[in-house]
Structure formats: C-alpha cells, structure tokens
C-alpha cells in the first residue's frame, strides 16, 4: 500500500462575471424604488427639501442690489445649487443604502444568486437617477416659477444635468461605501468626497480666478463640469457644445466610479 | 458515487486564525445532511465555502461537479444565512418576488414559496414587523423561490418554537424526497437525530462523518449528545 499523496490545489480562481442582464438590472432598480416607496418621509424630504433650501437662498439675496448687466447672485448660485443638491443627497442616500446591503448580509446573499455585480450597481444608479429626475423636476419648477430663477436655456436640460449629477453622486456613494465599515464612517465620507468638489467647482470663486494649482485640481473634479454645464444653460438659449461636452465628462466620471465600485464588490471575502 | 458536494482537504484561515483544518467529506444527493457542532466550530465558514463566498487557503470544494461559487451554480444552489438576510423595509411578498426575479422565476413561484413556509397571511407585512421566527422563514422563502437543487441552510431553526421546528424539519425531508439535497447546520444536538447523515465539527476538525444510527453505535449511547461526547473523549484519549 502506498502512502496517499495529497495534492493541494489552490482555491478556484474567481471567475469574473461581467455579463450584464437588463432584466436583473431592472428588477434591482424596481426593488430599490419599492424600498424607497415604503419610506414616506425620505420621499417627502427628497422632493421638498431642495426647494425649501433654494427658497432660503432666494430670500437671502432678494433685496440686495445687483450690478447692471450682470446676472443676480441668486440666478448664479441658485442654478449651481440645482446641480450640487442632487449630487450631495444621492451620494449620502446611496452610501448608506449600500452599507446596509453589506452589513445586513443581503449583499453576500445577492452574490450567490445569478445577479451580476454591474447589474446591482446599475440598478442602484437607475433607481436613484429616477428619484433624482423627480426631485429636479419639482425643484426647477419651483425655482423658475416661485423664485423667478432666470434660466435662458431649456428647463429640461437643467433636469438632465441634475440627473447626470445625481448618478455621479450615486456612483461615488457606491464606491465610498466600500471603504466604510460603519454608518458613522460612511456619513463622514460626505465631507471628504463632496465638500472639496463644492468648494472648487466655481460656486464660491470662479474657476479662472483661482490660483493655478487650485484650477488644476478643480479641472479634474467632475462637479466642476456639472456646474459649468448649468451655467451654460443659464446663459444661453440654445444648447452649447461646451455644455454637451461637460455632461459627457460628468457621465464618464460616473461610469468610471461605477466600474471602480464593481471592482470593490468581492464575491469571496475572508 | 455521485455526491453533490465534495470537499477535499479544505483549509480556511480567518485573519491569523486557522478556522478549518483540512476537511474532506462528501454530501450525498437527495438527503438531509446535518452539520452539527458548537458555536465557533467553523460551521458558518464551511457553509460559506460551499456557496463560494469564502476565501479559502487551500483545498477544493466542488458542488454539482463545478467549483463552488461558479456562475453556473448560482441558479442551482440556494443559501440562507444565519441572520435573516432579507430587506427589512420590504414586505414578505416584495422580498420573495425580488429573489424570484433574480432566479428567473415568476411571481407565482414567489407565492408558492411564501405558502411553503406558512407566511401567506403575513405576505403583506414589512419584514421588520415580523417576529424572529417569521423572519427566518421569510428568509428561507427567498431561497426556496429559486427551486435550488442544493439548499445550504445555516441554523434555520434557531429561535423557533418546537412545533414550528418539527414542521420545518418535515418540510426539509419532503424536499429531500422530492430531489433536493439539503445541508443544514445546527448547534443543538437533539436536531442531529432528524438528519439522514451527520457531520460533527469541533474546532474546525471533522469528528464524525456518519449517520445518527452509526453515531449511537460508535458512541455507545442512544442519546446523541452523550454519544457525541463519548466520541470526543475517545478521540482525545487516542491523542493523549
């Protein structure tokens, strides 16, 4: 009798599932929206809060004199906020939602089902993108009718930019949640990821008046392009090429963030 | 022999600690195989390796002839974690329908799975409003909905009242009779007698791969807990 030879084989290589299933993506988006539907207060806050905050800004500058020939401060800041607010809200909501998937064990369970990682992430993007569209529609309508926000271009373009911005927030939120182990950490990624972009996007100081190195940083932050796109819509009656290019940059950044987020979703963990 | 799960020399580390020390065993088809062992013995880690979500140090785990966790298995293997991993803010029905969609099933199968675990009357309730026992069953329904060939259940009867526990075990056997292979963990020895086959795990090592009858004979006791203790003592006597 010979001694048994034990051949130690290494763990099977994790096969990448890069296939996309529109059906599973849609099912996931529908599930996320259903979760949202059960949370009435979140829906109410999502829809109403940006309009209320914008109203506060409107009242703040209402009676201040404006320089002739220059847009009013509210017209500039209010329009910029239409891009920043959905970005911030969706970043926060998504990073918490994804963290809950991780800590409740549902993520691990999902990864044992036929659902692909990209299906899950795109499902989130679609669901919160849709929520952002509703939010933007309400906010833009209120801003232009009640607060008299002056937008030269199409209001639908403002909504489109807000949605692309929200999807960017979703994508970065999904990515950030990979680095957070607790809700406390997840919430603190908001100032880390969001505030520098808000400071440098051209809202506080126009980008061309910043120091050179700050301009360089501003130029690689996606929110800068979203703000530029909004300013283009605000000042031009027809859609400009710059605006389309800006939108493409923001969408591209969102896709890169989604791909990175997919890479952080490990099917096997230790 | 066409075993459904084949584990060979499986070694798993978690952090710097070795959790499973080279396990080898096979799970036969269409039976209820119980994985018994105290809390901390490595049961959950072993189950995670079988469904392919655990990083393993060495060794192989094959399920239905494929490496554990391969895409081809994701329609065929169902997994229910110990803590119910279901969406708290959805109803039982919405949860079941979502998992049904992931497995390519319709809402009819979702209703059937809800009925199978006896939650039809609670189908419209939010998951977080259910009792602990109901939550476990709702989680189970989300795995049943895919009609898996292999069902891996991590402590499915914890916190259930005795009547429900007996009901659930007879459901497991009915499923096995219908062709499903079940791999069920428990830390309660009185559930061992309900399994067709038994794996006894302690400190990451397999103490027995047996049947309840065989274990009673080996441990020279009709009481499985007692028999298990005798097996452990005999082992430690050998080692000393």
Image (cartoon, coloured by chain):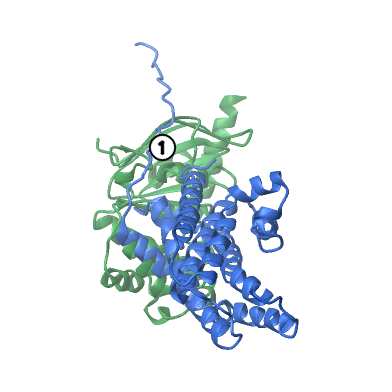
Chain colours: A blue, B green
Residue A246 at least partly seen = yes
- Residue at the limit of the structure toward the front, as seen here: A68
From the viewer's perspective, is residue A42 above or below residue A83?
A: below
Q: Chain of mark 1?
A: A
Quarter of the image that includes the C terminus of chain A: top right
Quarter of the image for residue A187 reads: bottom right
Q: Which residue is mark 1?
A: A14
- Asked which quadrant contains residue B61, the reply is top left
* Residue A192 seen in the figure: no
Q: Name the residue nearer the viewer: B86 or A29.
A: A29
Q: Assign the N terminus of chain A to one quadrant of the image.
A: top left
Please name whichever residue, B227 or B46, is drawn nearer the observer in this view of the structure.
Answer: B46
Q: Nearer the viewer, residue A46 or A269?
A: A46
In this view of the protein, which residue sits in the foreground, A54 or A229?
A229
Tally of numbered tags: 1
Residue B215 rendering spot, x and y as whole percentages: 43, 42
Q: Is residue B236 above or below residue A20?
A: above
Q: Residues within 10 Å of mark 1 (few under 14, many from 20)?
A: some
- Element marked by disc 1: loop
The residue at 43%/22% (across/down) is A8
Please state the horizontal and vertical placement of residue A236, each as a whole percent of the image: 50, 69
Q: Is residue A18 left or right of residue B154?
A: left
**Residue at far bottom of view:** A146
Q: Residue at the location (39% across, 13% down)? A: A3
- List x then y, in percent, for residue A214: 70, 48
């Amino acid at each position: 009798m010979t001694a048994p030879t034990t051949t130690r084989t290494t763990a099977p290589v994790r096969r990448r599932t890069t296939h996309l299933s529109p059906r599973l993506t849609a099912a996931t988006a529908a599930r996320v929206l259903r979760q949202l539907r059960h949370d009435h207060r979140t829906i109410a806050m999502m829809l109403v809060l940006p309009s209320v905050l914008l109203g506060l800004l409107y009242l703040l500058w209402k009676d201040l004199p404006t320089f002739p020939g220059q847009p009013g401060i509210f017209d500039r800041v209010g329009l910029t906020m239409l891009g920043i607010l959905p970005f911030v809200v969706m970043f926060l909501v998504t990073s918490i939602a994804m963290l809950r998937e991780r800590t409740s064990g549902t993520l691990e369970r999902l990864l044992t089902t036929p659902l692909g990682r990209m299906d899950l992430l795109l499902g989130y993007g679609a669901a919160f993108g849709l929520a952002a569209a509703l939010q933007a529609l309400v906010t833009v309508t209120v801003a232009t009718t009640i607060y008299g926000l002056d937008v030269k271009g199409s209001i639908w373009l403002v909504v489109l930019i807000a949605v692309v911005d929200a999807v960017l927030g979703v994508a970065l939120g999904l990515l950030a949640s990979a680095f957070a182990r607790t809700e406390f950490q997840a919430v603190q990624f908001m100032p880390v990821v969001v505030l520098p972009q808000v400071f440098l996007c051209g809202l506080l100081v126009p980008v061309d008046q910043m120091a050179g190195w700050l301009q360089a940083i501003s130029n690689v932050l996606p929110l800068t392009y979203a703000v530029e796109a909004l300013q283009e819509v605000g000042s031009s009656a027809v859609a400009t090429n710059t605006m389309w290019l800006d939108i493409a940059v923001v969408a591209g950044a969102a896709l890169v963030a989604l791909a990175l987020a997919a890479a952080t979703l490990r099917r096997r963990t230790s | 022999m066409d075993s459904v799960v084949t584990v060979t020399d499986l070694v798993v580390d978690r952090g710097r600690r070795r959790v499973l020390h080279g396990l080898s065993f096979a799970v036969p088809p269409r039976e209820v195989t119980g994985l018994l062992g105290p809390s901390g013995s490595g049961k959950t880690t072993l189950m995670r390796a079988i469904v392919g979500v655990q990083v393993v140090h060495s060794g192989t785990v094959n399920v239905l002839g494929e490496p554990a966790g391969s895409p081809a298995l994701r329609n065929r293997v169902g997994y229910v974690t110990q803590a119910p991993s279901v969406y708290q803010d959805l109803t039982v029905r919405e949860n079941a329908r979502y998992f049904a969609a992931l497995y390519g099933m319709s809402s009819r199968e979702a209703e059937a799975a809800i009925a199978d675990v006896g939650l039809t009357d609670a189908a419209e309730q939010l998951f977080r409003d259910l009792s602990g026992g109901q939550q476990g069953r709702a989680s189970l329904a989300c795995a049943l909905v895919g009609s898996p060939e292999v069902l891996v259940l991590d402590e499915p009867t914890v916190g259930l009242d005795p009547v429900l526990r007996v009901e659930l075990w007879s459901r497991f056997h009915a499923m096995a009779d219908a062709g499903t292979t079940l791999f069920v963990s428990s830390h309660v020895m009185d559930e061992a007698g309900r399994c067709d086959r038994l794996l006894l795990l302690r400190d990451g090592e397999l103490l027995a791969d047996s049947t309840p009858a065989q274990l009673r004979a080996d441990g020279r006791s009709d009481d499985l807990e007692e028999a298990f203790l005798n097996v452990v003592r005999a082992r430690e006597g050998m080692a000393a």
